[in-house]
Image: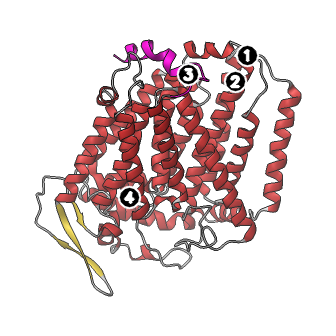
Amino acid sequence: MTSSFHSHSSAAMTGSSGAPLPARERALVGVTVLHLVFLPWAVGTMHPWSQLTSLGLALAGFFLALFPRAGDRIPGAGSPAARLLKFPLFWAGLVLLAYIVVQGVNPAWRFVSNADHWWLEPLHHVCWLPHGVDAPFSRSNPWRALVVMGSLWLLVCSVWTGLSRRRSYRILFSALVANAFLLALLGLLQQLTGADRIFWSYPSSSPSFIASFIYRNHAGAYFNLMVALAVGLACWQDQRARQRHATAGPAGLLALTAALVGLMVVLSASRLAIISLLFFAVLAGIGLIGQRRRQSLPARPRAAGWLLAAGLLAFLAVGFTALPVDRVWRRFAELAAHPALVVRDRTVAGQAAFDMLRDDWLLGWGAGCFRHAFPLYAQHYPDIYFSARHVQNYWEHAHDDLLEFPIELGLLGLLPIAFALSWSAWRLGQGRFWRNSVAFPLVLAGGLTLVHAGGDFVFQNPAVLLTWGVLLVGAVRWTELDGPDKRQSFAKP
């Protein structure tokens, strides 16, 4: 059925690039852009009001994708509902959401507090079923996690089901890059003016906020994804222009945007994000140069390439000279001088978190419930609440998503996630993503974000999580819509 979908609809999907999108798809692109743009500007969507707004936007997009208007049907592709039911991630996500619901209705503990303290009281529950903690929604519980994971599921399903043309993904990706440019400008202005509040008015719970993100590692992870997206689009635009014997068009502007957003990764002072950016630059550079050598495309005048490179270097030089990057060097110098001291806090926290995982590895403690049960294990490590710098710590997360997700969901709850990732990797392999100028940087950055998640809680930020999920699905779809038979259309003047 998949091959039938591609063979009958390739012309409609690639369609003449100038053909207008159907009304339903145009509306879905608009809602999806609004949703993904909203996420980072809403302070990373870390609060209940913004997460519920995100869920509302995801529902709107899902219904737009599922119920097309007359005349929007793609020949040979079947109805949107039929395509959705054949989407494996629809079923994997449905299983995961049902699992979280069971954790919510079967609490093993109740959160209780008074004016000075809070504690957990055990409850009678069905011990062989997934369970969680009965805690206030505002503090996080399985229902709060259900809102975030439900938004991710609805968003991924609507993008896969409703966006059937490469032009739709190009518009969506271009809007995300433009939004990242604006966020980077906000961050630069904050640095230049010495702002001590987000938007110069919103008090941040962390002094290390960047742009609209409360926490530096969340900002670094998000901007790294946007660097990859800008690089991929720049290479694709350049490739298309050379195939058409045209000027580079927006490729240079996209490259400049990638440099600006990359500068914000550095200014975030997130060590893991900066290291990820360096790895991305090296690996993406090698891969994209290899792609270009395999392609028989007209060469660009060397003068144009050198001019662009000089412009990018000059921009970065001015940025590093004018902006306060000394704290970045201090953080790396501290890591180089005292590596054990720098990672001591998270090492001890990791030991307590591993004890927590070992006690309920099969069913988990409940999605969104790590912060409530962790003190039961942290009390055996008294130093955990005082950092090496003698600053008191408060642990809401394990600072290791690759450990926190198993703790909350257990082995059974991880199975749908493992299936979704494996299926995505299989489809990307089928599409030979390493030969695709857009998919390759996205997959590389997505993998590096997973590595980053092993040292921090980047996926606890919905702006990072939902954007990462859409880019993963977008990379799969781009490899399908940008296959060899579709690239030939670029060569036509």
Mark 4 surroundings within 10 Å by alpha-carbon count, few (fewer than 14), some (14 through 19), many (20 or more) = some
The disc, 3 or 2, on the residue closer to the chain's N-terminal end is: 2
Number of callouts = 4
The disc, 2 or 1, on the residue closer to the chain's N-terminal end is: 2
Dot label at residue 181: none
Name which quarter of the figure residue 354 lies in: bottom left
* Three-letter code for the amino acid on which mark 1 is drawn: Leu
Residue at (63% x, 55% y) in the render: 183
Tell me the CA gap for discs 3 and 1.
Answer: 16 Å
| x, y percent for residue 79 | 33, 25
Tell me the CA gap for discs 4 and 2.
Answer: 41 Å
Q: Which residue does the numbered mark 1 point to in the structure image?
A: 297
Mark 1 surroundings within 10 Å by alpha-carbon count, few (fewer than 14), some (14 through 19), many (20 or more) = some
Residue at (47% x, 64% y) in the render: 346
Q: Which residue does the numbered mark 3 point to in the structure image?
A: 482
Q: Which residue does the numbered mark 4 point to in the structure image?
A: 52
- Is residue 154 among what the camera can see? yes
Image quadrant occupied by the N terminus: top left
Q: From the viewer's side, name the closer residue of 286 and 145.
A: 145
Report the mark closest to the observer, 4 or 1.
Answer: 4
Q: From the viewer's side, name the closer residue of 166 and 126.
A: 166
| x, y percent for residue 387 | 51, 74
Q: Is residue 46 above or below residue 223?
A: below
